[in-house]
Amino acid sequence: MSGYRLPAGGRIDRSRAIAFTFDRRGYRGFEGDSLASALVASGVTLFGRSFKYHRPRGLLAAGVEEPNALVTVTRGTGRTTPNLRAPSVPLHGGLVAESQNRYPSLGFDLGAINDRLGAFFPAGFYNKTFMWPRSAWEKLYEPAIRRMAGLGESPTTRDADHYAATYAHCETLVVGGGPAGIDAALTAAEAGGRVILIDEGEEVGGGALADPGQWAWLADALARLAAMPNVRILSRTTAFGFYHQNFIGAVERLTDHLAPTDANGARERLWRIRAGEVVLAQGAIERPLVFDGNDIPGVMLAGAARTLALRYGVAVGRRVVVMAVHDSGWRDALALAEAGVVIAAIVDLRETVDAALLAAAKAAGIACHLGHAVTGVAGRKAVSGATIAPGGTGAAQRIACDALLMAGGWTPSVHLWSQARGPLRWDDSWGAYLPDKSIERVRCVGACSGDWDFGGGVAVAALPSAKPAHQQKAFVDYQNDVKSRDIELAVREGYRSIEHIKRYTTNGMATDQGKTSNLNGLRIASEALARPVTEVGLTTFRPPYTPQTFGALIGHHKDALFQPLRKTAIDDWAATNGAVFENVAQWRRARYFPQGGEDMHAAVARECRAVRDGVGMFDASTLGKIEVVGPDAAEFLNRMYTNPWKSLQPGRCRYGLLLREDGFITDDGVAGRMAEDRFHVTTTTGGAARVLAMMEDYLQTEWSDLDVWLTSTTEHWGVIAVQGPRARDVIAPLVEGIDLSPDAFPHMAVREGRICGAPTRLFRVSFTGELGFEINVPADDARMVWQAVHAAGQRFGITPYGTETMHVLRAEKGFIIVGQDTDGTVTPGDAGMDWAVGKKKPDFVGKRSMMRPDIVASGRKQLVGLLTEDPDEVLEEGAQIVADPNQPVPMTMLGHVTSSYWSATLGRSIALALVRDGRARTGETLHVPMPGKTIRAVVGPTVFYDAEGSRLND
Amino acid sequence: MIEITPLAVSAADLVVGTAPVSGHDVRLSLAPAAARYSLRARDPATLAGVIGRALPTRIGDMQGGIACLGPDEYYALLPAGERVPDGAGLPVSVVDVSDRALGFVVEGTGAAAAIATGCPLDLDRFAVGRATRTLFETVEIILLREDTTRFRIEVWRSFAPWLWHALVAAIADR
């Protein structure tokens, strides 16, 4: 192909030249050019190397269906985009584009050796050849294949751009701004509703842009739309996905068409559109023809050549041959001739064509070869001639040419229609699938519905040839380098469904998702199988319609805004005081407070000793809290939790265990009865939302007769745990209106009063085994109260502690953490918590499941304590436990370690474990195999410290 | 080798702004402190009697600072410090949630568009005086339309820093 700029014509602005580079060489185009049109106008024929064989490839198409001309565009550091389709890249001053998949250069590519060895790389080659040895796949084959076969390179630096997103609503959404779409938008807008018109092009107009006869109409129609206040036109926008109930995802490209220095603001915007009605006007895509040499640069779609000439003023060659099986090829040839492009010949496989077309071609001085097929193409990096033969098998003759256009008929773009679950029907005259009967609030108009006049034609699988298919380089899928013979091989090897053939050959699996290849592949498979196309199936259309950036899909959900990080009202104090944090669910929590050069081990040991010997304070604000209110509050809790609640007196607390319907523990927490009809229920930090949803579910679906309501108060209350023998001494001077004496305010009680002037719900509860209080105050007061407690506690050596110390202290007492010591398959019995189950209760959630045969059977894993023989050895959490370490591998595993810590209080390690028949193994020595050693540990009770609980009741 | 530089700002650094943020015909500011109550009852008349205030009758309506969020659910936004009787013993639920949420005010001719960046509601059909629980991206909010160009957003306090900065980013993008 030796393209050149026509002396006149096109929608480009010839007064505004634009300089750009392609593979570091400078070129010039005009305002209004695409990268593809400017390069073709400059005589460039070679655009890229193919995926597998590294064959030289030129431009095939003029739209997003382009499979070959993929480029990488760099707009500065962190702004590199691979795999852009050259026809869809608008030209701007200073554009920097590079070709892909070639080394060292596009013109001389070492990988092209693959093409010479092509006979050794049939479909399924990778699967067959690189399977053994298995270990070599990851280290050797896969990296090597990736280097050789590939598209552009992924960027390796942080994306410097940012991306916007929005929702939008309209009564009518029109996808596609060609004549049919514009008409539909005008009609809908005149009816008064909100209309959004989406078009993926640089200019709205679709096919009309390549038809100067429609330009006046187009300008007028767009002006009318623009003047209507109820119409929004989104150009440079791709509707990439159709989701439930007319929800459309679209990406608007905001800055890529501008020179980087002119680009401000977000690069792209994600539009999430809910539409009353969706009108699809996506048009149709021209099909290539399958023949030997159909991928040599200069062989391209006839419609694309027309677009280049009439929209961009670019001739694809100086001597052009058209290979048609469809009238549209003749129309394109005539339009090209009229624009000044020399058409050397029109070759048509049909014996007869429309007399008017034939007459017009002859009148234009074009040689016509009816009943002929192209059987070969001369040239490697550019077409230099075509061989044609009658019926593909007769006496061959050669025609000199520098461009060969294919007119294989048109495939309606039913992508979004199919994503909407719209049914399809085969249409013989189109040789393609068309939308079948309508679906609610979605319709197709124009070419994508089959309602467009491209003329008539025949649909063929591959052009006839005397050469057998396996000797031809006749490409079906250009981007994935699939030839007709690969599809025939797949059929020979036994594949019958098009879905399997697709995966075996990779036909249609590239970034273009087979926009130009699916129908040809289907037809070739159908002929090879000797079954009608409709019986071979059709592959599914999935979003996205064209590749989209991750940035657009992510929007603001990155970096600091990736997801909310929840912090308590006391978090600032912890940060100021050197806390090391950990994330728990969405919350960040202080894990420990190192002092001096302490590591975690030393800090936690110090914090633990402080709580056991004096007093510590802990931010427990993240605990989930639910206010359960109403005359039936106690009845409701009685049905939800395993424990009895109705007898609980106001002012008292109870530990509650929550099961799922299947009888397994799902959450736990302490609840206080604030009044006859009001409970303050706490949940685990991570379980707060889940437990509220579960309770709401039961309330609304099972027990809607109960007069009780649930309100999340997690964020209303800040919670300060003050724990240790001196806890009462610390808070006493701060509390008003509550008698703190042990008799008046015993363990597991709750009182209301004031602390530091703030209203408080003061709980006397303990997750440490020590005398303890949990001060609930409104969140706005939490920081003030925390600091007051900290100040008041100074003379007692009060020590702020974090979640790690909390974990150690509770483990010393054998208190479980749901989700750590339980895993969704642990019953109260397994956890040794039968005491928390109300035996006399008629029912509670999960009760019936506790009688299932596998729940009452022996051999269940039970929670036990483990003490290593070597007291300094701290087991790994998650480590497996066996009875006999000398068994052959795989050993019989009895269970695993769930919690394991160094206990400073006890001066040794402690662990909890789930072990098969664990409680019956008390006193038994078990083994924990670790890399290089096996650790011996003795089974015992889960409570390691103050088993009598005497310290709680001081 | 992929080397990604550390972030200049992490999620842990986000705080609710103390000063309003303006741009593109939108102004985002923090609403003054308020008393907030979650009110529940099967029978609205009983609840109205307990709190001594009239209740809106249609879901999504606001009246006297009280929004009807569901068939048995109301959300009262009252001047700070105002108390509501708790209706002990009656089939109602009155819960003080004053400190659970922060209020944002989003106002200006661009307010609706700024909120629409992350809220899936059709705001053209969300009339003045309407209120509903909804989402801004992944975060639950209560959205109240106080005037044609003024909205109030109620958001749980630990989500407020994220929402504030997400709105600031949305305002900057427009």
Image: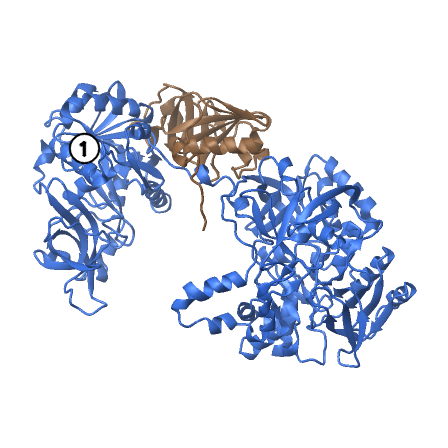
Q: Position of residue A153 (x, y in %)?
A: 54, 54
Q: Chain of mark 1?
A: A
Which residue is painted at 58% across and 35% down in the image? Answer: A265
Q: Secondary structure at mark 1?
A: loop
Residue A166 in sight in this render: yes
* Type of the residue with mark 1: Arg
In the rendered structure, the answer to whether residue A563 lies left or right of residue A365 reads: left
Residue A246 coordinates in the image, percent (x, y): 58, 48
Q: Which picture quadrant has residue A368?
A: bottom right
Q: Nearer the viewer, residue A91 or A124?
A: A91
Can I make out residue A32 in this image? no
Q: Quadrant of the N terminus of chain A?
A: bottom right
Q: Which chain is blue?
A: A
Residue A258, above or below A732: below
**Colouring style:** by chain
Q: Quadrant of the C terminus of chain A?
A: top left
> In this rendering, would A274 be left or right of A757?
right
Chain with colour brown in the figure: B
Q: At 56% across and 39% down in the image, what residue appears?
A: A166
Q: What is the count of numbered marks? A: 1
Mark 1 burial class by Cα count in 10 Å: few <14, some 14-19, many 20+: many
| Residue A683 drawn at (x, y percent) | 28, 40
In the rendered image, residue A215, in percent from the top left (x then y), is placed at 81, 46
Q: Quadrant of residue A4?
A: bottom right
* Rendered view: A503 above or below A635: below
Work out whether A204 lies above or below A226.
below
Q: In the drawing, does residue A502 fall left or right of residue A805?
A: right
Q: Is residue A203 above or below residue A737?
A: below
- Of the pair A760 and B82, the residue shown nearer to us: A760
Near-viewer residue (A620 or B73): A620
Q: Which residue is mark 1?
A: A652
